[in-house]
Each structure stands twice: as structure tokens, then as C-alpha cells.
Image (tube, grey):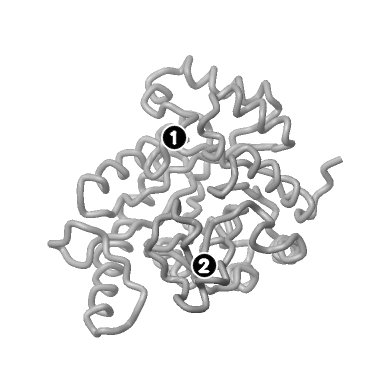
Amino acid sequence: MRLCLVTDCLGAMSFDKMLATAEQLGYQSLEIACGGWSAAPHIDLDRMLESSDARDEFMGKIKEHHLQLEVLNCSGNHLAPNDEGKEHEQVVEKTFRLASLLGIHKIVMMSGCPGGSPTDSTPNWICTSWPPITTKILNWQWNEVLIPYWKNKMAPLAKENGIERIALENHGCQMVYNAETLIRLRDAVGPLVGMNLDPSHLLWMGGDPIAAVHKLGADRIYHVHAKDVRVERNYMGADGCLDTKTIDQFAKRTWNYVAFGHGHNVGWWKEFFSCLSMEGYDGPVSQEMEDLTMPPLTGLKKSTVVLKEALPMDFD
């Protein structure tokens, strides 16, 4: 496995300062977001597409810090039936083109979530089978939108740009949000599609990431995010995990994204990574720090200590 960093947590830093920090903390590779739901703090997508000098400088600086560019991330909702969806789709298309220019063959993104009918103007995430209309909506989303989109648009676009793997994050409010939905889309589209297994999302949804590792196996896991969740016991028991308060209201939420090891101890994470290794996964483990209760650099430093202890790797 490789120690990778999602650089957004250092978004307040310049590109050069971020690289120096990542090197100092012992990271080996980088996951850089290009837009969508990210502000893309460390890359100018249009400039990179337009200028070979910009690309050479970008990759040269990464190499100078003994790092490699692991993957580009274009997570957003390109299936949203509105202007945001069109904007996110443009980011996806540009990211694919940039990946081709940089020799990157894997993309991290999300499956997308369409509306509930051809006339909707907002996405509609269905996570229940009642009332009966929900099943009708879900069947339309899968059979009329999601599968045709991925088979007829995303797969050819990926092939055109030399992209061999697309790692879909199992995020809530997406059509692919767990092992079952990933397998369903993969069965329809083929091995281009695999999972970016982010255990934090399964944890807040009440799932077991370790069970997901064994259900998916290494053949279907293309990327792994190292991100933790803490269930807030003073609220969860009474209200459950379906919390609509924004993440900046962390003192009132039933669950929160937290620094690595601040929700589940290092023993739990050792088991998680041991099981990944057992299944044959030997790819990047990408630290994604989204704890709002502490300064980003502090959270990253604390997370890195726990991650290094938990991974079945020698960092000497």
C-alpha cells in the first residue's frame, strides 16, 4: 500500500507549501481535486489543459518533493438536472482530458444522482422502498439515466483518454453509495468501474466497512480513502443517523467526520487495513482530513500518526 494525501485539507496553503508539508509528513503520493465539489485549491484545470509549460512545472515540483501524482479527483454531481450538473460534467470531461495529458490512468469521482423524473430540476436520492413511488423513481434513475449514461458516455470518454479505472466513492446522496450499488453498476458497465472505498460514509450509514472489504474484494476496490467518523452518543441514540444539520454545526450533529483515530481507535483501523491486505489490495490509502473541530494542519498531523501505525507498512 502507498501513503497518499487528499490535498484539500491543506487548501489554505500554496501549492509549494502543501508539497513541502506532504513530504515532511512522509506522504508518498497525492490525490488532487480538480473541481466539482472541491474548490480545487492546488490546480488550475483550464491553465493545465492549455499550457504544456504549466503541466511540466506542476509535475516537476511534485517530483522535486519526492512525491508522485497518484490520481485526479473530480467528485461532484454531473447527473444533477440543472446548471450545477452541467458545470460538474464539464469538470469531469476536462479532468479526463488532463489525466490523458499527464499519463494518469485512474480517476476518483462519484456516480452522480439524477432527478426523480424527466421534469425534475433537483437531484433525488432514494434510500427507502416506501411509499411505492420511490421504487418507480429508483428504477427510472437506474435504467433510464445512470446505466445508459455510464455505458454510453463515461465509458467511451474514459477509453478515449486512456483512463483504465474509475474509482467511485461510496458517498450518500449518490446512486452508488455501498458495495451492492457499486456491484450493480459494475455488472452493467464493466471493470472500468470500481470503488473508492471511503469507510467514513458506510460508518455514518450504519454499515461495516470491514464487511464491505470482504464483499467487494480487491478486484473491485480501486482506491481507498482514510477518513474517520464519530457517532455522537449524546444525540445519535435519540435521533438516529439521518442528520440534515450542516457539518459546521458539529456540536449539535448526531455524527461528524473527525481526524483519523478520533472516531475509531487504531486497533479498529489495523483490522480494517489488515483485511484489505488479506483480500489482496495493495494500492493507495489516501488520507482525507475533514475534522472541523481543530485546525487542518493539526488534524492532518494527528491523523498521519494514527494512519502510519495502522497501515501494514514499514515507514523507517
Helix, strand or loop for disc 2: helix
User: Which kind of residue does numbered mark 1 sit on?
Assistant: Ala
Kind of residue at disc 2: Trp
Q: Is residue 253 left or right of residue 219?
A: left
Whole-number angstrom distance, CA of label 1 to CA of label 2: 26 Å
Which residue was labeled with disc 1?
A: 40
Total labels: the figure holds 2
Residues at badges 1 and 2 in contact (C-beta under 8 Å)?
Answer: no
Q: Describe the element under mark 1 as helix, strand or loop.
A: loop
Of 205 and 112, nearer the camera is 205
| Image location of residue 40, percent across then percent down | 44, 34
Horizontally, residue 122 falls left or right of residue 106, namely left
Q: Quadrant of residue 5?
A: top right
Work out which residue is located at the far top of the displayed protein and give it. Answer: 53
Q: In this orientation, does residue 91 appear? A: yes
Indicate the position of residue 101 as horizontal and vertical percent values.
46, 29
Q: Which residue corresponds to the image point at 41% horizontal and 36% vertical from the top-left?
A: 39
Which of the 4 image quadrants contains residue 274?
Answer: bottom right
The spot of residue 263 in percent (x, y) is: 64, 62
Label 1 environment density (alpha carbons within 10 Å; few <14, some 14–19, many ≥20): some
Instruction: Single out the mark in the foreground, 1 or 2.
Output: 2
Q: Is residue 235 left or right of residue 315?
A: left
Residue beneath the point at 48% across and 78% down: 238
- Neighbour class for label 2 at 10 Å: few (<14), some, many (≥20)? many
Residue that appears at 30% across and 54% down: 152
Where does label 2 land, which residue?
Answer: 204
Q: Earlier in the sequence, mark 1 or mark 2?
A: 1
Q: Which mark is residue 257?
A: none
- Please state the horizontal and vertical placement of residue 139, each as a whole percent of the image: 27, 74
Viewer-nearest residue: 166 or 33: 33
